Every structure is written in structure tokens, then in C-alpha cells.
Amino acid sequence: MKKLYERMAETGCIACRLSNQKQITRTEIHHLRSGMGMSQKNIKCIPLCVDHHRGSKCGYHGLGRKRFESLYGSEEYLLKKWMEEHGEIDWDEYS
Ligand SMILES: [Zn+2]
Ligand SMILES: [Zn+2]
């Protein structure tokens, strides 16, 4: 999983990228809700900068899922966009 995190961190924040914003804070890994609470297997993740991850103005955890997704699209959508640019991820490999 570490390898994937590193790879994602290198590519930068996907929300900045899609909204044409200049990323000013470092990249963190956000785990998708859909994979949480169930099995620990196949937990998907996306790269988000600190602002888009937990910032109070535009962050996923700062705004809450609904408001964040109304601005940037769903987590699954952001993940899909990331994979379109950087290649599909074989989640089994990381589980
Ligand atoms: Zn960002
Ligand atoms: Zn998160």
C-alpha cells in the first residue's frame, strides 16, 4: 500500500488538478468512504492536498462529504479521473 500512496502523492491533488487550482499544500491520502467500515481489503484512496482534504473552506473533512462532492464530484469520480491519467490500479495488489 505504501508504494501506491507514494505514487499518488507524487501526482498531486486530484481536486486541484480538476479545478485548475494551484496546489499550495502538500499531498495527503484520503481513503474512500465506500471502503471503510467493511473489510480492510480493497480500501480505495485518492490524493488530496491538505486544503482539499481537511481544510475548512474546501476540504472533504472540513466541508463534509455532501458539500465537497457538490463542488468537486464524488470520490469515485475523482478516483476514476486519476486512473484515466495515471493508469488503472489493481486494488487486489494492495489489499
Ligand atoms: Zn487540492
Ligand atoms: Zn480523508
Image: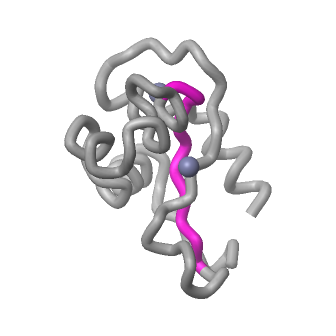
Q: Is residue 18 left or right of residue 1?
A: left
Q: On the rendered image, what quadrant is the N terminus found in?
A: bottom right
Q: Nearer the viewer, residue 62 or 19?
A: 62
The quadrant of the rendering that contains the C terminus is bottom right
Please tell me in which quadrant of the rendered image residue 10 appears.
top right
- At 44% from the left and 42% from the top, the residue drawn is 60
| Residue 54: percent from left, percent from top | 54, 35
In the image, farthest residue toward the left: 70
* Figure check: 63 above or below 82: above
Horizontal and vertical percent position of residue 75: 37, 55
x, y percent for residue 12: 56, 31
Q: Extreme right residue here?
A: 2
Q: Could you say which is closer to the camera, residue 93 or residue 72?
A: 72
Whether residue 19 is situated above or below residue 60 in the rendered picture? above
Question: Could you tell me which residue is drawn at 50 percent across and 32 percent down?
Answer: 13
Q: Nearer the viewer, residue 16 or 58?
A: 58
Please tell me whether residue 37 is drawn above or below residue 47 in the rendered image.
Answer: below
Q: Would residue 24 appear left or right of 34 to someone viewing this image?
A: right
Q: Is 49 colored magenta in this rendering?
A: yes
Residue plotted at (45% across, 34% down): 59
For residue 24, side relative to residue 76 (left or right): right
Any magenta on residue 52?
A: no
> How many marks are shown on the rendered structure?
0
Say above or below: 21 vs 17: above
Q: Residue at x 49, y 62 (%)?
A: 32
Q: Quadrant of residue 26?
A: top right
The residues colored magenta run: 42-51
Residue 56: horizontal and vertical position, in percent?
Answer: 46, 27
